[in-house]
Structure formats: structure tokens, C-alpha cells
Amino acid sequence: MRSEYWRNVMAGMYVLADNGTDEEQEATWKLMDQIHAMDMEMYGAPETPLEEAWYNIKFLIFVLQLMNYRDPDQIEKIVSIAEHLIAETNLRKEPWSLRESILEDLYENDWYDEYGVYSILQILGESLCTNKKERQIALRLRQEVGIE
């Protein structure tokens, strides 16, 4: 998975850029572009559509955490990304290790329910399991974190 540290820094800066003066916003956006470039240099571009989409979803969730309220625009972006993944991405071709790590994250964070994205992320989570063996692993993971 990509660097969560940089994603979290960028999310904080995103909130600052959205609320600062014009000069502060411009400086923050420039710095964010530099951080993004460093992240790409260190970790490379996301290798799969799922990896890129999950990186973006996690970024938007962290923005919501920093904002301390359910911003409908951010929620709509998350829903849009997830819906696109479910409808357009051949999840069967994505590495199981990536899909499994996303499931673990979803389960450990109760589908990010507190941010108003429970339903769509639950549908996405169900879509990540493409065969019986993966559904059994997902069931075991849910039981481990206390989700029935």
C-alpha cells in the first residue's frame, strides 16, 4: 500500500487550503503538488485501478476526519469512486492481497460508518470477494474484529 503518512499530510493541507486566504491557499496547493510528486517518486504510481481508488477514498476519509463534520461534497466523491469501482473495475483481476488488506481496513473501521459512507463501502467490500474461498476468508476477518 502507498504511504499513509503523506496521504494524511496532504489531507490536512487540503483542509487548510480550503479555508485559508488566497495566498495561503496558493502556497498550500503548491506544497501539496511537491509532496505528491515526492510520493510518486518514492512509491511510484498506483499499480492497479483498485489501489489508486482506495488511496483516493482513504484520502477523502481523512479529510472528513479533519473537518469534523460530514461534508456532502467529500461523501459524494467517495460514493462516486466506490460506485465506479463496483461497476467498472474487474476486481477479480486485482491482487487478492490488495483486496484483503482493503477488507481488513473496512472491517477494522466499521465500514467508516461515522463518515456517512457505510452503505457504499459495505457494497464495495462485498464486491472485493470474487469466489467462495475469498468470502470464507472475509467471514473469518469479520469475526476476528467482531462484525457479524
Image (cartoon, helix red, strand yellow):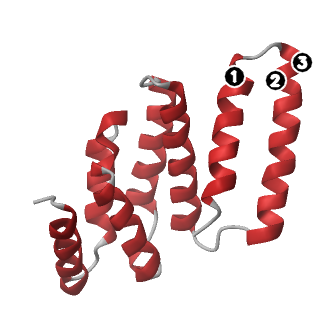
The picture places residue 120, in percent across and down from the top left corner, at 31, 46
Q: Residue furthest top?
A: 21
**What distance separates the C-alpha of mark 1 from that of mark 3?**
12 Å
Q: Amino acid at mark 3?
A: Glu
Determine whether 13 is above or below 97 in the image.
above
Q: Is residue 61 left or right of residue 107?
A: right
Circle 1 residues within 10 Å: few <14, some 14–19, many ≥20: few
Q: Is residue 44 visible?
A: no
Query: Which quadrant of the figure has residue 93?
Result: bottom left
Q: Amino acid at mark 1?
A: Asp
Q: Amino acid at mark 2?
A: Gln
Label of residue 29 in the image: none
Q: How many marks?
A: 3
Callout 3 secondary element: helix
The picture places residue 61, in percent across and down from the top left corner, at 48, 42
At 78% from the left and 52% from the top, the residue drawn is 36
Determine whether 46 is above or below 56 in the image.
below
Label of residue 25 in the image: 2
Q: Closest to the observer: 73 or 2?
A: 2
Residue under pointer 3: 23
Q: Is residue 107 visible?
A: yes
Residue under pointer 1: 18
At 28% from the left and 73% from the top, the residue drawn is 129
Q: Is residue 47 left or right of residue 77?
A: right
Q: Is mark 3 in CB contact (under 8 Å) with mark 2? A: yes
